[in-house]
Amino acid sequence: MDAISYDEFANNFSVDSILQNFQGNYNDGLNVCTEICDRYANDETRVGLRYERADGRSGEMTFAELKRRSAQFAGFLKSRGIGKGDRVACLLGRTPELMICVLGALRVGAVYQPLFTAFGSGAIEYRLGKAGTKLIVTNPEQWPKLADVNDLPETMLVAEDGAAAATEANHLFWQTLEQQADHFEPVLIGPEDPFLQMFTSGTTGKSKGVTVPAKALPAFWMYMRYAIGLRQDDNFWNVADPGWAYGLYYAVVGPLLLGCTTHFNEAGFTADNTLEFLRKYNITNLAAAPTAYRLLKANDSLVADFPGINLRVASSAGEPLNPEVIGWVKRRFDCTVCDHYGQTETGMTSANFHELGHPHRDASMGYQIPGYRLVALDAGFNEVGVGETGELAIDIENSPLYFFQGYTWNEKSPFHGKYYLTGDIVINNGDGAHSYTGRDDDIIASAGYRIGPAEVESSLLEHEAVIESAVVGKPDAKRGAIVKAYVVVRPEFDGNDQLVEALQHHVRTRLSTHSYPREIEFVDELPKTSSGKIQRFLLRQQAEAEAKLSA
């Protein structure tokens, strides 16, 4: 299939052309469960979800079965007085029960609230309290965390009668569902009404609330169809956890919106487990964070043990993907992996497209998704010229797919005039594409230069000794700051002075003489968020503390 020209598609784009695919509309109202489930349920054989539990048990659910089960869950919610606008939370892994909860909450017009299973009780309590959540669904493994949660809402446990904590929970999941009718008329909501209650992961302070309205569906559809390149005959797997935005938006809502089968793998991420899942389920379309691709590349020797992997396309989001990793995926799987960019607040807004034809540039976040206008702004909020660096922003007035209206509880304002400010620093490539250089607070000012950590990290990753790297600025009396790198090396290499010199030479040669790391510290692992993003702010704090001690 030949890709459509990006320019041609963008010039003719309209939101109405996407809305024509939906069953509901903005004027009369729509129901998100109808759009992502019911309208595909007439074919009793059409599979919506294939799943594999942590204990190895596997199965699948058709859209028809998901429709019936979600009706039962919706009936239960209504019986508890939970309906339009109420928050319903899940503290579950990637399981069919989680999918039923999402769909059932949306069917009754409620707002689904994800909780990541690595959260502690404090994070859970904050999110439940802030959102005024009416119900939390969890399992025996997670149940002990709730003991320390104040003002706990009603609880539902995914467990059999007699299991641990079964007598403590207010309701048992399967037992309760079986008491409900398998039909429930979907509750309509308007385009501005919420259907998801997210919280940003945040690097400092409390997480901010992000409410996703129903009018986000066209943006999700656009990303899945043209950036991910999802086709009806694809076996699609998004590795991201649905406890976070990328997993919930694009492993649950997005693929089901297109009527495609999505895959859940409850087991923890390892190279051999991932390779086996790719092989066993004949995954043709893969989405994952760069961490996943880097881990597979670091375990290159295992790939030969899993013949028959049949990837057609792959996508990456969360942080910049190194060209070396892109090249490795191409060589190993004969598959193109495209870098994409977005945020919890806005969904995905920039991509290297699988289904739209355009020039590709190494280390670029790609082109604005049609329906968005992206610009880079200088310190005075003026749009910068070609080749210049600035803060990535969305021109709201000229972005018909844009849906974020501000943080749920007005925790801060990310707007300036007609612009939504992302906080990310990019280079304007001049052809509609941008290249990521770092977060605004990650930029290193050294001897008059502004150095983005991403390009230094990318250069380090090209060295055969390096598995992962994170780069921060360390205060320095002479230069204002110096570049410091924290590096994880392969087992066969020694983290010694010789390797420090080799890596410094490599970056000086490959990147520039002013950007090389003047200090390199070898570490066993890098601090990351639960979604795999490197927490540079922790390393920055560490480097600042070191500088104070040596001052």
Image: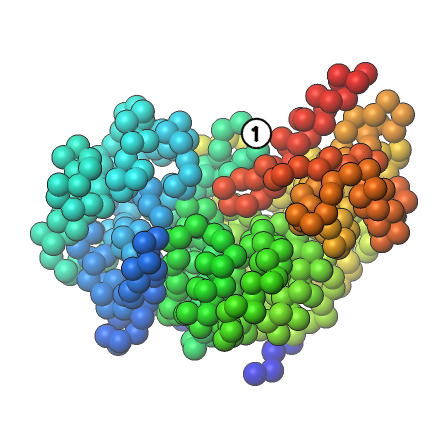
Is 121 drawn above or below residue 364 in the view shown? above
Is 147 drawn above or below residue 520 in the view shown? above
Depth check: 298 or 376 in front?
298
In the displayed structure image, the side of residue 511 where residue 541 appears, left or right: left
Q: Is residue 341 visible?
A: no
Q: Helix, strand or loop at disc 1?
A: loop
In the displayed structure image, the side of residue 96 where residue 428 appears, left or right: right
Q: At which x and y percent is residue 215?
A: 43, 55
Depth check: 172 or 402 in front?
172
Residue ranking furthest to the bottom: 1
Q: At which x and y percent is residue 113?
A: 36, 43
Please rate how many residues cluster around mark 1, counting C-alpha atoms within 10 Å: few if below 14, some from 14 to 19, many from 20. Answer: few
Q: At which x and y percent is residue 128?
A: 34, 33
Which corner quadrant holds the C terminus? top right
Coloration of the structure image: rainbow
Q: Is residue 97 visible?
A: yes
Image label count: 1
Depth check: 29 or 320 in front?
320
Which corner quadrant holds the N terminus? bottom right
At 34% from the left edge and 61% from the top edge, which residue is drawn?
51
At 16% from the left edge and 46% from the top edge, which residue is drawn?
160
Q: At which x and y percent is residue 260?
A: 39, 70
Residue that numbered label 1 is attached to: 204
At 62% from the left edge and 59% from the top edge, which residue is drawn?
297
Check disc 1 and give the amino acid type.
Thr
Depth check: 135 or 34 in front?
135
Rendered image quadrant of residue 339:
bottom right
